[in-house]
Image (tube, helix red, strand yellow):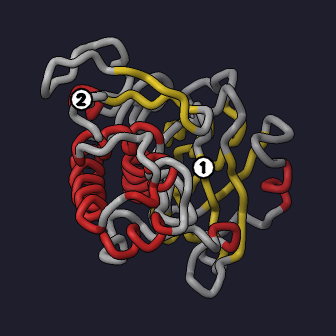
Amino acid sequence: MPELPEAESIATALDRALRGCSITKVEVFSPRLRTPIKPLETAGLVGLRINGVRRRARYAVADLSDGRALLMHFGMSGVVRVEGAEVPRRKHEHVFLWLSSGKIFRFEDPRRFGLLEVQPLGEDGWPVSLAGIGVEPLSAAFTAGLLHAAAARRRGPAKLLIMDNSVVSGIGNIYAAETLFAAGISPLRPASELTLEECGAIVKNAKRILRAAIKMGGTTVSDFLNVDGSEGKFAQKLMVYGKSGQCCPKCGTVLVNVKLGGRGSVFCPKCQH
């Protein structure tokens, strides 16, 4: 599932491809993804200009000239492309937005866990369904103090804390595992036991790792592709994610995998405490 760096890479590429274009035709080929997509046909999109594309958490948000926004989430297998009309429609492409540039915005999602909706903006300037999402991890608002205060109220493990979108938005399984390894903290540690210093290490490493992943176009493990069809190159830099049974790159101890919140979590039992 695309996490923050992947969503950032997609939003940046879409901003370059879509900014200033008007929508000339809408075609919907399936009834629904995560939510119904047929309403796109009657949402009054034709004639609207796309003023830009930005990211919030794991979502891409295309700002429309009538003050609404097109909200995108890519689920487990969503891929967006901006291509010419000469490219035949792929089997799992569910929505075409024809553009004044002569190209087509195309939304593909074999597993149909993605989302594509038109929404009004709330008072915070973001689509209304995103209200209540936590702070952006790359913002100044994500601090050791904020994380420590949230941790004090939690009985669950540290990894689930930093994956909680109501606390900090956009850190999923990949980057949570990598952040905790870099910080030397076990994903199993009760969040309430984290010290302010340890929370500072989590914040510092999360920011560093996310920025590095964005520079490399995100991480491709299975399905993720960028808008131009390229894979995210940060997979080459992963230290523990997906490496259960291999040797720890720091100490040589065999990495182990545990289930937390229904997701695998790989860590080093010697380096992470």
* Numbered disc 1: secondary structure: strand
Q: Residues within 10 Å of mark 1 (few under 14, many from 20)?
A: many
Horizontal and vertical percent position of residue 270: 23, 29
| Residue 193 figure quarter | bottom left
- Circle 2: residue type: Lys
Q: Can you see residue 114? A: yes
Q: Can you see residue 50? A: no
Q: Residue at x 46, y 50 (%)?
A: 190
Q: Residues within 10 Å of mark 2 (few under 14, many from 20)?
A: some
Direction from residue 38 to residue 72 in the image, left or right: left
Q: Residue at x 67, y 26 (%)?
A: 110
* Numbered disc 2: secondary structure: loop
Q: Gap in Å between the C-alphas at discs 1 and 2? A: 37 Å
Horizontal and vertical percent position of residue 88: 61, 24
Which of these two is toward me, 82 or 152? 152
Q: Quadrant of the C terminus?
A: top left
